[in-house]
Protein backbone atom coordinates (compact mmCIF):
# COMPACT_ATOMS: atom_id res chain seq x y z
CA UNK A 1 0.00 0.00 0.00
CA UNK A 2 1.46 3.34 -1.04
CA UNK A 3 2.02 6.03 1.59
CA UNK A 4 1.26 8.71 -1.00
CA UNK A 5 -1.94 10.70 -0.43
CA UNK A 6 -3.69 13.69 -1.90
CA UNK A 7 -3.85 15.48 -5.22
CA UNK A 8 -1.34 18.25 -5.91
CA UNK A 9 -1.89 20.77 -8.72
CA UNK A 10 0.67 23.05 -10.34
CA UNK A 11 0.83 25.32 -13.36
CA UNK A 12 2.65 28.56 -14.04
CA UNK A 13 -0.50 29.53 -16.05
CA UNK A 14 -3.02 30.76 -13.53
CA UNK A 15 -6.22 30.00 -15.47
CA UNK A 16 -5.03 26.53 -16.32
CA UNK A 17 -4.32 25.97 -12.64
CA UNK A 18 -7.91 26.94 -11.81
CA UNK A 19 -9.23 24.51 -14.45
CA UNK A 20 -7.10 21.70 -12.96
CA UNK A 21 -8.34 22.55 -9.48
CA UNK A 22 -11.86 22.01 -10.85
CA UNK A 23 -11.00 18.48 -12.00
CA UNK A 24 -8.69 17.81 -9.05
CA UNK A 25 -11.57 18.53 -6.67
CA UNK A 26 -13.64 15.81 -8.36
CA UNK A 27 -10.80 13.26 -8.16
CA UNK A 28 -9.99 14.16 -4.56
CA UNK A 29 -13.64 13.64 -3.63
CA UNK A 30 -13.71 10.25 -5.31
CA UNK A 31 -10.54 9.18 -3.52
CA UNK A 32 -11.69 10.82 -0.27
CA UNK A 33 -8.50 12.78 -0.03
CA UNK A 34 -7.44 16.42 -0.09
CA UNK A 35 -6.56 18.77 -2.90
CA UNK A 36 -3.44 20.90 -2.59
CA UNK A 37 -2.05 23.53 -4.93
CA UNK A 38 1.58 24.54 -5.39
CA UNK A 39 1.55 28.31 -5.86
CA UNK A 40 5.05 29.01 -7.09
CA UNK A 41 6.54 32.23 -8.44
CA UNK A 42 7.50 35.73 -7.47
CA UNK A 43 4.92 38.06 -5.92
CA UNK A 44 2.18 35.44 -6.10
CA UNK A 45 1.19 35.50 -2.44
CA UNK A 46 -1.97 37.53 -3.04
CA UNK A 47 -3.47 34.75 -5.16
CA UNK A 48 -3.28 32.10 -2.42
CA UNK A 49 -6.67 32.77 -0.81
CA UNK A 50 -8.36 32.87 -4.21
CA UNK A 51 -7.15 29.34 -4.93
CA UNK A 52 -9.01 28.14 -1.87
CA UNK A 53 -12.18 29.84 -3.13
CA UNK A 54 -11.75 27.91 -6.39
CA UNK A 55 -11.56 24.57 -4.57
CA UNK A 56 -8.13 23.98 -2.99
CA UNK A 57 -7.97 22.57 0.54
CA UNK A 58 -4.33 23.55 0.93
CA UNK A 59 -2.02 25.99 -0.77
CA UNK A 60 1.75 25.52 -0.59
CA UNK A 61 3.14 28.94 -1.28
CA UNK A 62 6.68 29.31 -2.57
CA UNK A 63 7.18 33.01 -3.27
CA UNK A 64 10.72 33.92 -4.24
CA UNK A 65 12.19 36.56 -6.61
CA UNK A 66 14.38 33.80 -8.13
CA UNK A 67 11.17 32.28 -9.47
CA UNK A 68 10.01 35.35 -11.37
CA UNK A 69 10.75 33.79 -14.73
CA UNK A 70 10.15 30.11 -15.42
CA UNK A 71 13.36 28.11 -15.50
CA UNK A 72 12.87 24.39 -15.43
CA UNK A 73 15.66 23.60 -12.96
CA UNK A 74 14.50 26.19 -10.43
CA UNK A 75 10.86 25.12 -10.59
CA UNK A 76 11.95 21.49 -10.56
CA UNK A 77 13.75 21.93 -7.26
CA UNK A 78 10.59 23.43 -5.72
CA UNK A 79 8.22 20.77 -7.04
CA UNK A 80 10.64 17.97 -6.21
CA UNK A 81 10.98 19.15 -2.61
CA UNK A 82 7.23 19.42 -2.31
CA UNK A 83 6.65 15.98 -3.82
CA UNK A 84 9.16 14.42 -1.41
CA UNK A 85 7.73 16.15 1.68
CA UNK A 86 4.02 16.14 0.88
CA UNK A 87 4.04 12.78 -0.97
CA UNK A 88 1.05 13.36 -3.24
CA UNK A 89 -0.64 10.37 -4.80
CA UNK A 90 -1.48 12.40 -7.91
CA UNK A 91 0.26 15.39 -9.46
CA UNK A 92 -1.61 17.42 -12.08
CA UNK A 93 0.71 19.73 -14.03
CA UNK A 94 -0.42 22.21 -16.69
CA UNK A 95 0.51 21.04 -20.19
CA UNK A 96 2.26 24.20 -21.30
CA UNK A 97 5.69 23.93 -22.94
CA UNK A 98 7.22 24.74 -19.56
CA UNK A 99 4.88 22.44 -17.68
CA UNK A 100 5.68 19.49 -19.91
CA UNK A 101 9.42 20.04 -19.55
CA UNK A 102 8.96 20.21 -15.78
CA UNK A 103 6.71 17.14 -15.54
CA UNK A 104 9.13 14.95 -17.48
CA UNK A 105 12.07 16.04 -15.33
CA UNK A 106 10.10 15.58 -12.13
CA UNK A 107 8.96 12.09 -13.13
CA UNK A 108 12.55 11.12 -13.88
CA UNK A 109 13.79 12.48 -10.59
CA UNK A 110 11.03 10.75 -8.63
CA UNK A 111 11.48 7.55 -10.68
CA UNK A 112 7.81 7.47 -11.56
CA UNK A 113 5.66 7.66 -14.71
CA UNK A 114 4.11 10.62 -16.49
CA UNK A 115 1.16 10.73 -18.90
CA UNK A 116 1.33 13.89 -21.02
CA UNK A 117 -1.61 15.80 -22.51
CA UNK A 118 -4.49 13.99 -20.85
CA UNK A 119 -7.87 15.03 -22.12
CA UNK A 120 -9.78 12.84 -19.66
CA UNK A 121 -9.05 11.59 -16.17
CA UNK A 122 -10.78 8.97 -14.10
CA UNK A 123 -10.05 6.66 -11.19
CA UNK A 124 -10.34 2.87 -11.42
CA UNK A 125 -11.61 0.46 -8.75
CA UNK A 126 -8.11 0.13 -7.29
CA UNK A 127 -7.89 3.90 -6.89
CA UNK A 128 -5.39 4.26 -9.74
CA UNK A 129 -5.57 7.25 -12.00
CA UNK A 130 -6.51 6.56 -15.64
CA UNK A 131 -5.40 9.19 -18.13
CA UNK A 132 -6.76 9.34 -21.66
CA UNK A 133 -4.74 10.92 -24.44
CA UNK A 134 -5.06 11.22 -28.18
CA UNK A 135 -2.53 9.06 -29.97
CA UNK A 136 -1.56 7.70 -33.43
CA UNK A 137 -1.95 11.09 -35.07
CA UNK A 138 -5.42 11.55 -33.63
CA UNK A 139 -6.72 8.17 -34.80
CA UNK A 140 -6.96 6.53 -31.39
CA UNK A 141 -7.37 7.29 -27.72
CA UNK A 142 -4.94 5.60 -25.33
CA UNK A 143 -6.03 4.83 -21.77
CA UNK A 144 -2.98 4.70 -19.57
CA UNK A 145 -2.44 4.02 -15.87
CA UNK A 146 0.41 3.82 -13.39
CA UNK A 147 2.47 1.23 -11.56
CA UNK A 148 4.34 3.81 -9.51
CA UNK A 149 3.66 6.82 -7.27
CA UNK A 150 3.19 9.72 -7.54
CA UNK A 151 1.03 9.54 -10.63
CA UNK A 152 2.01 12.53 -12.77
CA UNK A 153 -0.16 13.77 -15.63
CA UNK A 154 -0.09 16.93 -17.68
CA UNK A 155 -3.34 18.65 -18.65
CA UNK A 156 -3.79 21.02 -21.60
CA UNK A 157 -5.70 24.29 -21.23
CA UNK A 158 -9.46 24.31 -21.79
CA UNK A 159 -9.95 20.61 -21.16
CA UNK A 160 -11.61 21.00 -17.77
CA UNK A 161 -13.87 23.71 -16.37
CA UNK A 162 -12.99 25.87 -13.41
CA UNK A 163 -15.47 25.90 -10.53
CA UNK A 164 -17.46 28.92 -9.45
CA UNK A 165 -15.50 30.62 -6.64
CA UNK A 166 -17.12 30.51 -3.21
CA UNK A 167 -16.15 31.08 0.39
CA UNK A 168 -14.42 27.97 1.71
CA UNK A 169 -11.96 27.10 4.45
CA UNK A 170 -8.44 26.14 3.55
CA UNK A 171 -4.89 26.25 4.76
CA UNK A 172 -2.06 28.33 3.32
CA UNK A 173 1.45 27.15 4.13
CA UNK A 174 4.39 29.32 3.23
CA UNK A 175 7.44 27.24 2.38
CA UNK A 176 11.05 28.21 2.27
CA UNK A 177 12.51 25.89 -0.31
CA UNK A 178 16.14 25.78 -1.38
CA UNK A 179 16.13 26.70 -5.05
CA UNK A 180 18.70 25.09 -7.32
CA UNK A 181 20.80 27.31 -9.53
CA UNK A 182 20.08 26.53 -13.17
CA UNK A 183 22.75 25.08 -15.46
CA UNK A 184 21.63 27.43 -18.21
CA UNK A 185 21.42 31.19 -18.57
CA UNK A 186 18.80 33.15 -20.52
CA UNK A 187 20.73 35.50 -22.78
CA UNK A 188 17.83 37.24 -24.50
CA UNK A 189 14.04 36.98 -24.78
CA UNK A 190 11.94 38.22 -27.71
CA UNK A 191 8.16 38.24 -28.12
CA UNK A 192 7.00 35.49 -30.47
CA UNK A 193 5.62 36.75 -33.76
CA UNK A 194 2.35 34.95 -34.00
CA UNK A 195 -0.65 34.95 -36.28
CA UNK A 196 -2.94 33.24 -33.76
CA UNK A 197 -2.42 35.07 -30.49
CA UNK A 198 -5.14 34.22 -27.98
CA UNK A 199 -6.90 31.89 -30.38
CA UNK A 200 -7.27 29.33 -27.59
CA UNK A 201 -9.26 31.89 -25.62
CA UNK A 202 -11.42 33.05 -28.54
CA UNK A 203 -15.19 32.70 -28.32
CA UNK A 204 -15.52 32.62 -32.10
CA UNK A 205 -12.96 31.30 -34.60
CA UNK A 206 -13.21 31.61 -38.37
CA UNK A 207 -10.78 29.12 -39.89
CA UNK A 208 -9.59 28.36 -43.39
CA UNK A 209 -7.84 25.55 -45.19
CA UNK A 210 -6.40 24.79 -48.58
CA UNK A 211 -9.70 25.83 -50.18
CA UNK A 212 -8.25 29.32 -49.95
CA UNK A 213 -6.44 29.91 -53.23
CA UNK A 214 -4.09 32.75 -52.44
CA UNK A 215 -2.69 34.53 -49.44
CA UNK A 216 -4.51 37.81 -50.17
CA UNK A 217 -7.82 35.97 -49.92
CA UNK A 218 -7.31 35.85 -46.15
CA UNK A 219 -9.11 39.18 -46.25
CA UNK A 220 -12.40 37.27 -46.75
CA UNK A 221 -11.88 35.58 -43.42
CA UNK A 222 -10.61 38.72 -41.73
CA UNK A 223 -13.71 40.70 -42.76
CA UNK A 224 -16.04 38.07 -41.34
CA UNK A 225 -13.88 37.78 -38.20
CA UNK A 226 -14.03 41.53 -37.66
CA UNK A 227 -17.81 41.57 -37.71
CA UNK A 228 -18.07 38.61 -35.36
CA UNK A 229 -15.24 39.78 -33.12
CA UNK A 230 -13.58 36.47 -33.91
CA UNK A 231 -10.03 35.19 -34.33
CA UNK A 232 -8.80 33.78 -37.63
CA UNK A 233 -7.46 30.23 -37.59
CA UNK A 234 -6.15 27.88 -40.23
CA UNK A 235 -5.02 24.35 -41.02
CA UNK A 236 -1.41 23.23 -40.81
CA UNK A 237 -0.64 23.21 -44.57
CA UNK A 238 -1.40 26.93 -44.77
CA UNK A 239 1.26 27.56 -42.14
CA UNK A 240 3.85 24.86 -42.76
CA UNK A 241 3.73 24.56 -46.54
CA UNK A 242 2.43 27.91 -47.75
CA UNK A 243 3.80 30.05 -44.89
CA UNK A 244 0.70 32.27 -44.87
CA UNK A 245 0.38 31.89 -41.10
CA UNK A 246 2.85 31.13 -38.32
CA UNK A 247 0.68 28.69 -36.39
CA UNK A 248 -2.30 26.43 -36.90
CA UNK A 249 -5.19 24.71 -35.18
CA UNK A 250 -5.22 20.97 -34.59
CA UNK A 251 -3.53 18.03 -32.99
CA UNK A 252 -0.05 19.47 -33.39
CA UNK A 253 -1.20 23.08 -33.08
CA UNK A 254 -3.59 25.14 -30.99
CA UNK A 255 -6.53 23.41 -29.32
CA UNK A 256 -9.53 25.71 -29.46
CA UNK A 257 -12.78 25.60 -27.55
CA UNK A 258 -14.90 28.43 -28.95
CA UNK A 259 -18.66 28.78 -28.82
CA UNK A 260 -18.62 28.93 -32.62
CA UNK A 261 -16.04 27.50 -35.05
CA UNK A 262 -16.59 28.35 -38.72
CA UNK A 263 -14.50 26.00 -40.89
CA UNK A 264 -14.10 27.31 -44.44
CA UNK A 265 -12.50 25.28 -47.23
CA UNK A 266 -10.89 22.78 -44.94
CA UNK A 267 -11.47 19.07 -45.26
CA UNK A 268 -11.73 18.18 -41.57
CA UNK A 269 -9.04 15.51 -41.46
CA UNK A 270 -8.71 13.97 -37.99
CA UNK A 271 -5.52 15.89 -37.14
CA UNK A 272 -7.38 19.17 -37.60
CA UNK A 273 -10.56 17.99 -35.89
CA UNK A 274 -8.53 16.89 -32.85
CA UNK A 275 -7.97 20.58 -32.13
CA UNK A 276 -11.58 21.73 -32.57
CA UNK A 277 -13.66 18.91 -31.11
CA UNK A 278 -14.45 20.89 -27.96
CA UNK A 279 -16.07 23.70 -29.96
CA UNK A 280 -19.72 24.17 -28.96
CA UNK A 281 -20.99 24.70 -32.53
CA UNK A 282 -19.12 23.90 -35.73
CA UNK A 283 -20.27 25.38 -39.03
CA UNK A 284 -18.62 23.98 -42.17
CA UNK A 285 -18.45 25.65 -45.56
CA UNK A 286 -17.07 23.30 -48.19
CA UNK A 287 -17.66 22.73 -51.90
CA UNK A 288 -17.37 18.96 -51.51
CA UNK A 289 -20.49 17.43 -49.93
CA UNK A 290 -18.42 14.35 -49.01
CA UNK A 291 -15.80 16.35 -47.05
CA UNK A 292 -15.23 14.75 -43.60
CA UNK A 293 -15.76 18.08 -41.85
CA UNK A 294 -19.51 17.64 -42.42
CA UNK A 295 -19.40 14.58 -40.13
CA UNK A 296 -18.44 16.72 -37.15
CA UNK A 297 -20.25 19.92 -38.16
CA UNK A 298 -23.51 20.99 -36.51
CA UNK A 299 -24.40 23.05 -39.58
CA UNK A 300 -23.05 22.57 -43.08
CA UNK A 301 -23.10 24.73 -46.19
CA UNK A 302 -22.13 22.98 -49.42
CA UNK A 303 -20.76 25.65 -51.69
CA UNK A 304 -17.87 27.82 -52.79
CA UNK A 305 -16.34 29.84 -49.96
CA UNK A 306 -15.65 32.63 -52.47
CA UNK A 307 -19.44 33.06 -52.87
CA UNK A 308 -20.53 32.27 -49.34
CA UNK A 309 -18.06 34.25 -47.24
CA UNK A 310 -18.77 37.67 -48.84
CA UNK A 311 -22.54 37.00 -48.75
CA UNK A 312 -22.43 35.87 -45.12
CA UNK A 313 -20.29 38.85 -44.12
CA UNK A 314 -22.68 41.25 -45.83
CA UNK A 315 -25.77 39.64 -44.28
CA UNK A 316 -24.21 39.78 -40.81
CA UNK A 317 -23.11 43.37 -41.33
CA UNK A 318 -26.74 44.32 -42.04
CA UNK A 319 -28.07 42.28 -39.11
CA UNK A 320 -25.55 43.52 -36.58
CA UNK A 321 -25.35 47.19 -37.57
C1 LIG B 1 1.36 14.03 -37.41
C2 LIG B 1 0.49 15.02 -38.14
C3 LIG B 1 -0.02 16.08 -37.43
C4 LIG B 1 -0.84 17.01 -38.09
N1 LIG B 1 -1.35 18.04 -37.36
C5 LIG B 1 -2.21 18.88 -37.94
C6 LIG B 1 -2.81 19.93 -37.19
O1 LIG B 1 -2.54 20.11 -36.00
N2 LIG B 1 -3.67 20.75 -37.83
C7 LIG B 1 -4.02 20.61 -39.15
O2 LIG B 1 -4.82 21.39 -39.64
N3 LIG B 1 -3.46 19.63 -39.88
C8 LIG B 1 -2.56 18.77 -39.33
N4 LIG B 1 -2.00 17.79 -40.07
C9 LIG B 1 -2.31 17.77 -41.52
C10 LIG B 1 -3.63 17.06 -41.80
O3 LIG B 1 -3.41 15.67 -41.88
C11 LIG B 1 -4.26 17.53 -43.13
O4 LIG B 1 -3.33 17.33 -44.16
C12 LIG B 1 -4.68 18.99 -43.11
O5 LIG B 1 -5.44 19.28 -41.98
C13 LIG B 1 -5.51 19.28 -44.36
O6 LIG B 1 -5.62 20.66 -44.50
P1 LIG B 1 -6.81 21.31 -45.32
O7 LIG B 1 -8.11 20.85 -44.77
O8 LIG B 1 -6.53 22.77 -45.35
O9 LIG B 1 -6.57 20.78 -46.79
P2 LIG B 1 -7.33 19.73 -47.66
O10 LIG B 1 -7.40 18.44 -46.95
O11 LIG B 1 -6.68 19.75 -49.00
O12 LIG B 1 -8.81 20.28 -47.78
C14 LIG B 1 -9.18 21.41 -48.51
C15 LIG B 1 -10.69 21.44 -48.51
O13 LIG B 1 -11.14 22.62 -49.13
C16 LIG B 1 -12.30 22.35 -49.88
N5 LIG B 1 -12.39 23.41 -50.90
C17 LIG B 1 -11.56 23.61 -51.95
N6 LIG B 1 -11.92 24.73 -52.62
C18 LIG B 1 -13.01 25.23 -51.97
C19 LIG B 1 -13.84 26.37 -52.19
N7 LIG B 1 -13.59 27.24 -53.17
N8 LIG B 1 -14.87 26.57 -51.36
C20 LIG B 1 -15.12 25.69 -50.32
N9 LIG B 1 -14.36 24.59 -50.08
C21 LIG B 1 -13.32 24.37 -50.89
C22 LIG B 1 -12.07 20.97 -50.45
O14 LIG B 1 -13.29 20.34 -50.77
C23 LIG B 1 -11.35 20.28 -49.28
O15 LIG B 1 -12.27 19.62 -48.44
C24 LIG B 1 -1.16 16.86 -39.46
C25 LIG B 1 -0.63 15.78 -40.16
C26 LIG B 1 0.18 14.87 -39.52
C27 LIG B 1 0.74 13.73 -40.30
Image: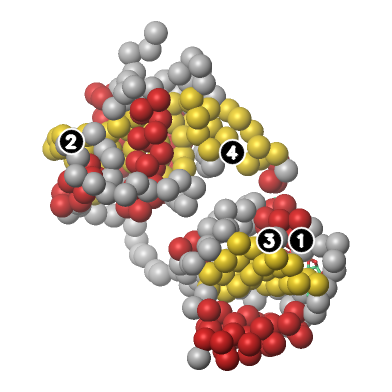
SS at mark 2?
loop
Q: Position of residue 232 (x, y in %)?
A: 57, 74
Is tag 1's residue or tag 2's residue first in the polypeptide sequence?
2
SS at mark 3?
loop
In the displayed structure, would residue 274 be above or below residue 317?
Answer: above
Is tag 4's residue or tag 3's residue first in the polypeptide sequence?
4
Disc number placed over residue 294 in the picture, else none: 1
Residue at image mark 3: 298
Q: Position of residue 261 (x, y in %)?
A: 60, 66
SS at mark 1?
helix
- Of residues 72 and 214, the one nearer the viewer is 214
Q: Quadrant of ligand 1?
A: bottom right
Residue at image mark 4: 133
Residue at image mark 2: 170
Alpha carbon distance from label 3 to label 2: 43 Å
Is residue 78 visible in the rendered image? The answer is no
Rendering quarter of residue 25:
top left
Amino acid sequence: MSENRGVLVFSEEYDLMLEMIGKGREIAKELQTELAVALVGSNVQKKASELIKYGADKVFLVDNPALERFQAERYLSVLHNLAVDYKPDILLIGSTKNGKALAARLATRLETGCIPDCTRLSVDKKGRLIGERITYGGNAIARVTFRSRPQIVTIPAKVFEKLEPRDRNGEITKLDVKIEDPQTEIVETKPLETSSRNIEEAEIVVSCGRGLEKKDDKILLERLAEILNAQVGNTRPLAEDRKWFTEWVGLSGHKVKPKLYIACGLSGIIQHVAGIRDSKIIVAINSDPEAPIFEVADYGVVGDLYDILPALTEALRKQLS
